[in-house]
Each structure stands twice: as C-alpha cells, then as structure tokens.
C-alpha cells in the first residue's frame, strides 16, 4: 500500500510562454506566466485533486508532468529522478509510467480505428506484448477493468458507436494498458453528461484501489473532489494557494479564494448554504501578474499590505498550508 516515500516531488516549477516578438526598442516580448512556481509532493497511491478556474495553469502543469512542455524553471522528481532533464530514451520509458487521460473523449480517439486497435496501440509503440495473444489479453484486461464488459463486445466496434461515457472508458483503458504508476486525469468528466460523471469518478476510485495508482485529478469544480481525492490543491493564476487533506480544506478553508470557490458550490439543503462570496472581476491576465498577492485585486478581505507582499505558505493545521498574509499571526 502507501509507502512513505515520495513518488512525485514538484519544486518551484514554472512555464512561461513567450507571446509576440521582442520590440526593437528593447522591450521584452510578453510572457504568459501559465505555471509560475508550483510546489507539491505525492506519496504512492495518493489521489490529489488540482482545482482552479479555467486559465489558472492546470493543463500546462499536466503537460509539464508528461514531458509534453519544457519547463522554464524548477524541477519535477518522479521516483527520485528529475524528469525535466530526461533524455529522449528516458522520456519514452517515463511515458509508460506516467499516463494521461484528456478532457475530451471525442477528440482523443481516432475515429478510423477499432477499439481493439486504439487500446493495442500503446503496447505496439512500447513493444510491450511479445505476441498477438498476449496483446489481446492485455487489451481485454484493460477494457474490463475500465468497465467495458465483456470486452469481446467492444473490440471490433468504433468510437462513433459508443456513448460519451463509454468513450472515456476506452481512453482510460488505453492509459491503463501500459500499467502506469501515475495517472494524470485532466478534467476527465467535464465534457460528459452530468448523469454519468459520478460513474467515471467512481471508476477512477476503483482503479486507484485495484491497481494502486497514484492519481492527479484535475477539475475546475471543487464540488467533484469530495468523491475520491485524499488531498486538494487549489490553484490561482499559476500557483497553488492552498493545499491540504480534502476534508480539512473543504470544512476549514483558509484562503479567501478557496472560500469563494466553496461558496458557489450548490448545496441542496438551504440551511447549510453559505453566504455566497461572488468573486470580483475576471480571472486576471497571466501576462500581467498583480503585484504582492496575485489574488488581491479580487480578494474580498485584502488589506493594503496585500498589494505589496507576496505571501508565503503558512501551515494552518497538520499538512494543511495556505498562502495568505491574513493568516500570519
Ligand atoms: N502554448 C501556449 N502559448 C501561450 N499561452 C498559452 C499556451 N498554453 C496555455 N497558455 C495560456 O496559459 C494559461 C494557462 O492555460 P491552461 O494551462 O490551459 O489553464 P487551465 O487548464 O487551468 O484552463 C492561459 O492563460 C492560457 O491561455
Ligand atoms: Mg485545462
């Protein structure tokens, strides 16, 4: 089960995109600070939910973990090695150990391939099955573990013959077939019908137990994390602003941004409803990061000092940290 050794350690990772060209008057080209100093670690078997509004850098962070984007700064240690410096050969080996489930099950499946071809392809690329029989066994196993049972009913079918939920199960099967240790699921249910979201999240929860997977579950909806995340990290404008055990963060949020996100989750019982804290303004532009605390222009409780000081993380309770000046005693 869970060992106390970090499987993943992310240290001050940054990804800045250059947009436009430097001007001849010596001005810098504009930089999008998509990921701007993210730190966290994970133990084997952990599920971490990464939550934040659209544009806060969640997908860019997963691309960095997958080696699909090159970092601007910082390090990512996976099983003890800094993967931001991986060679091509190491990268290929890593792409078997770390797999990703993308948001859109309609775009991530090749419509001209049968389900068997789709789920076999990673095995062929990584030369992981010694013969067609072994390959088929692994494909059947991955499909059935993903809830497509009996697999024989699906092998010869094509993506357009399946529902959105079934397609996302095929996407999950083609990640699982490589037997990864880390699964990065980038908004895996946001394109699906509300009625089947819980099914897919339950499937991920089952797989995590059955295959001892470590999972990064990315979502813009704090309402879905309670299902299976052990810990939650809340991201704002390229940084994590609060991280802790799921129950602690949901019951006892400390950062004003987390509080605002929680106050807009619909609660069926009106007596439990909290006062809605509507966030002021739009998500700011990651080209011009506000001074001091990057949340201050939208923060309902900001004080003068928040315009100047960039707050450090403070441990508010065991394993629960938040970056807000107002928490400094
Ligand atoms: N290739 C790119 N070039 C320039 N800007 C990008 C690129 N990819 C993402 N961005 C910008 O980086 C920010 C973070 O994007 P993204 O990681 O997709 O956020 P999220 O997944 O949280 O919605 C956004 O402002 C987005 O426009
Ligand atoms: Mg995204």
Image: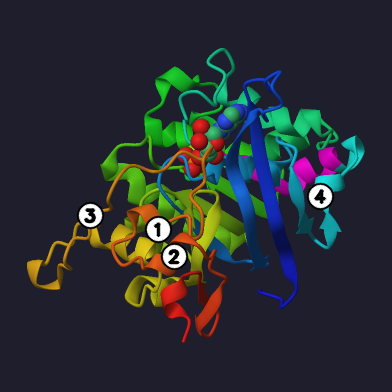
Q: Residue at x 26, y 43 (%)?
A: 195
Compared to 140, does 38 lie above or below?
below
Q: Earlier in the sequence, mark 3 or mark 4?
A: 4
Q: Nearer the viewer, mark 2 or mark 3?
A: 2
Q: Earlier in the sequence, mark 1 or mark 4?
A: 4
Q: Answer whether labels 1 and 2 touch (C-beta < 8 Å).
A: yes
Identify which residue, 303 or 327, lies in the foreground. 303
**The image quarter in which residue 95 lies:** top right
Q: Earlier in the sequence, mark 3 or mark 1?
A: 3
Q: Which residue is mark 2?
A: 306
**The image quarter in which residue 253 lies:** bottom left
- The secondary structure that dominates the magenta segment is helix
Q: Residues within 10 Å of mark 4 (few under 14, many from 20)?
A: some
Work out how far the residue at label 4 is from the one at label 2, CA to CA, in angstroms. 35 Å
Q: Nearer the viewer, mark 4 or mark 2?
A: 2
Q: Residue at x 44, y 68 (%)?
A: 305
Task: Find residue 278 and name its label.
Answer: 3
Q: Could you say whether the residue bearing mark 4 is in a helix, strand or loop?
A: helix
Q: Which residue is mark 4?
A: 83
Residue 181 coordinates in the image, percent (x, y): 70, 55
Q: Which residue is mark 1?
A: 296
Work out how far the residue at label 1 is from the one at label 4, CA to CA, in angstroms. 34 Å
Q: Earlier in the sequence, mark 2 or mark 3?
A: 3
Q: Answer whether labels 2 and 3 touch (C-beta < 8 Å).
A: no
Q: Earlier in the sequence, mark 4 or mark 2?
A: 4
Identify which residue, 324 or 38, lies in the foreground. 324
Residue 129 coordinates in the image, percent (x, y): 81, 36
Compared to 175, does 179 lie above or below?
below
Q: Is 232 a magenta residue?
A: no
Work out how far the residue at label 3 is from the one at label 1, CA to CA, in angstroms. 14 Å
The residues colored magenta run 91-101
Work out how far the residue at label 3 is from the one at label 4, CA to CA, in angstroms. 40 Å
């Amino acid at each position: 089960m869970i060992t106390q050794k970090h499987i993943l350690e992310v240290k001050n990772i940054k990804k800045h995109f250059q947009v436009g060209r430097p001007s001849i008057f010596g001005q810098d080209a504009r930089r999008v600070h998509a990921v701007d100093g993210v730190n966290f670690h994970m133990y084997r078997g952990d599920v971490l939910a990464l939550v934040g509004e659209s544009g806060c850098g969640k997908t860019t962070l997963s691309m960095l973990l997958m080696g699909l984007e090159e970092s601007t700064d910082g390090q990512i240690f996976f099983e003890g090695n800094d993967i931001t410096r991986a060679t091509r050969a190491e990268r290929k080996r890593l792409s078997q150990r770390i797999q990703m489930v993308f948001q859109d099950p309609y775009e991530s499946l090749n419509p001209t391939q049968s389900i068997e071809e789709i789920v076999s392809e990673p095995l062929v690329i990584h030369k992981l099955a010694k013969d067609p029989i072994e390959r088929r066994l692994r494909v059947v196993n991955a499909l059935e573990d993903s809830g497509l049972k009996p697999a024989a009913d699906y092998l010869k079918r094509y993506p357009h013959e399946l529902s959105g939920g079934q397609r996302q199960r095929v996407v999950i099967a083609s990640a699982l077939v490589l037997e990864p240790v880390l699964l990065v699921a980038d908004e895996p249910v946001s394109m699906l019908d509300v009625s089947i979201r819980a099914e897919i999240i339950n499937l991920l929860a089952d797989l995590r137990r059955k295959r001892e997977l470590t999972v990064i579950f990315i979502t813009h909806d704090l309402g879905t994390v309670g299902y299976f995340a052990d810990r939650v990290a809340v991201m704002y404008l390229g940084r994590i602003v609060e991280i802790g055990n799921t129950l602690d963060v949901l019951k006892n949020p400390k950062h004003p941004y987390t509080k605002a996100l929680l106050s807009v989750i619909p609660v069926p019982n009106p007596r439990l409803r909290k006062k809605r804290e509507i966030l002021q303004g739009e998500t700011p532009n990651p080209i011009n990061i506000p001074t001091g605390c990057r949340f201050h222009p939208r923060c309902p409780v900001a004080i003068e000092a928040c315009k100047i000081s960039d707050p450090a993380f403070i441990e508010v309770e065991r394993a629960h940290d938040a970056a807000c000046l107002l928490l400094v005693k």
